[in-house]
Image (cartoon, grey):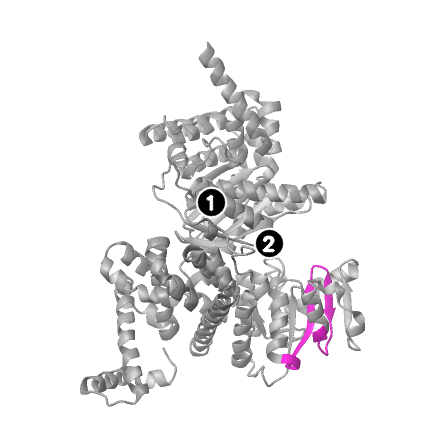
Amino acid sequence: GQGSRDDMFKLLKRELKRTKWLDPETMDLVFDRYPWLGVRRGEIITGFCSLMHPIMSKINPLAFSKTSIFHTVTKKRYIGHASAIVDLFLDRFHPTQRISQEDFESQRARLQELIEAEIEDTMAAGLLYKMLEIVSHSLKTNIFLENRYAFGLRLDPSIMVAEQGEDRELPYGILFAHGRRFNGYHVRFRDISRGGMRLVTPPNGEQYALESARQYDECYGLAFAQQLKNKDIPEGGSKAVVLIDVDSLSLSAKNFVMRKSVKAFTDTILDLIVDTPETREQCVNFRGRKEVIYLGPDEQVIPQDINWIIQRAAKRGYDTPNAFMSSKPRAGINHKEYGVTSEGVNVYLDVALREILGLDPKKDSFTLKMTGGPDGDVAGNELKILIREYGDNCKIVGIADHSGCAEDPEGLNHEELMRLFHASLCISHFSESKLGTDGKLHLASTEEGVKARNSMHNRLVSDAFVPAGGRPNTIDMHNYKHFLLEGGGGASSPLIVEGANLFITTEARQALFEEAGVAIVKDSSANKGGVITSSYEIICAMLLSEEEFTDNKQQIVNEVLEKLRNFASMEAKLMFREFHNYPGSLPYHSQMISNAINNTTDVVIRALDDSLVSEAEVMELLPLFRDHLPKTVADLAFDRVKERVPSQYVKNAIASSIASKMVYREGTKFVDAQPQDKLATIALAYIEKGKQVALLRESLEKGGVLGDSEKQDILALLEAGGARTALNLF
């Protein structure tokens, strides 16, 4: 009849519209091999296969390669089972005809019995069982949205744990997107979170397969590092890693695919988090609550992407679109322009040189080597700051980046380095005429140059090493001994300050400390300046108009820089204090500080959420939020907080302020000694007592006559803190 023809036409129109966003594997599956599958089912099967790769490859990387997973699941022998699993997924999330939980469990058990009875091949059976697990662990999908760009899932994080189990913290949430030539993960460790989006574009199919196997782990590791470094701000840590297949593409085609992938991935994230009539109607949500995510730019994300993402967030109905993506060209704080990450890195380097090497970098000469070029964000700005702060005292003996490396035992010429920095040129452009007698320039265009570049960070001897660029896990358990001097004479650098994320693996850090006493300031401490800045940018986007921000931008940036240097200084001083007073490496104490602050933040958030603290008491804590803001922002717009800032965000900000104040002042041992069930109460009381102490200090500073009660309070404080405080033991 006419009705059935109309329905068929609508289906055909929808599926033809989807084809420009479909992965080539999906196109082959549904248009050549199994036309009966239909586009929607084929897309889900392809997506599930991609999702399974990083999970199953941990069990057997050879048997469960990306190609073999897809080949096995889509064999004629098993495609019917895979299709039945997908039908169960569709029934579970159907907007108007969703099956009950009881029916779902019954059908899932029946499919499991069917696989057990009919599939003899253990590899095929294992993949089909895992597909069933994905269905059970999916909490939300965009599959029924009419105009979606890709297939998206909100996942229960436990699905990503391999069968043998993993002894690491589960994330709060995982979003997964599968689209044309890309797969993307977004991993976060707290409800409200922020972190960068990076694009990974392997040059060939073999490298793409390797990156696919470790994509989730890279995203997890970066998000976890972000969680550790986000301790001073309201947002928890997150990261997005988008793996894009650009094999055999021309440069222009590669760029087109990258930009298209950013759009598809971002729009899929918005599908899963925006609260609009369309998403409420078409997206079944087993989470049952709204989710708040903020992104930032990372590797290969360009200003064009940032502008599109903000505009798209506004069009899709995201509550605070200007805050959805940081580093906006006009109304943002550009990390590279202001050197925000490097400002923090240098605070840690300064404190470490004094505490570990006994050097005053303002007075004493020291040597340093670095990965990352003069044109890089962190490396380039760190060079500028080193020269600004220490002048000729800082001898930079080696720099390596993608283009090669420059080495000079007398120290590379500062003026030449600044020329490259201001011109955004990599190290291969260093003028050989500016090298000293024993200086060398190695270019990555030669085999010898590649070898020199790749070994520079191990070969050159210096007081300090600052990795400010390079791929994750450059130093690991297989090669860390190359960093040690021959004959057991220690390490090529006794001090490392990690400007780059995950440059050294956790195991390698510990081995370098145990075998050579290398002091390493880990990434989650050293480079947290960037995330602090992005957090303040989010706040500015919520509270200020674009005109207000741009009119006051330089003053706001100066205040943000002062705040991030202060956060870095407080943590550096506590970390070295605990390093000197207690056993353990610097990375251990860095993580203990992050854990103590994050744990305290979480328990205070729960107390504020669970009505253990009245609304009136929360309002009394608002001055903490005001203190957290840059002064200019607070003066202009603090009266808009209740109207423009989500209440959960305010609670998170208050909790993180309380936690960081308490931990930085009292140390991790104080926090760890408190009963977990009383920690929130103690933290809130601590802030109240802190106000009383501040009043006493003010009275003393003014030099007025103290009352008897004030004298008794001061005597009690001296008695309680006394000698232990004088010894700097906490």
Q: Mark 1 or mark 2: name the one nearer the start of the chain.
A: 2
Q: Secondary structure at mark 1?
A: helix
Image location of residue 543, percent across then percent down: 41, 57
Q: Is residue 79 above or below residue 8?
A: below
Image location of residue 197, percent across then percent down: 54, 51
* Residue found 59% across the figure and 36% down from its top: 180
Q: Residues within 10 Å of mark 2 (few under 14, many from 20)?
A: few
Which residue is denoted by mark 1 in the rendering? 314
Q: Is residue 452 visible?
A: no
- Which range is magenta? 391-415
Q: Is residue 520 above or below residue 153?
A: below
Which residue is denoted by mark 2 in the rendering? 299
Structural distance between the alpha carbons of marks 1 and 2: 24 Å
Image location of residue 565, percent across then percent down: 49, 71
Q: Is residue 588 left or right of residue 682?
A: right
Image location of residue 596, percent across then percent down: 38, 65
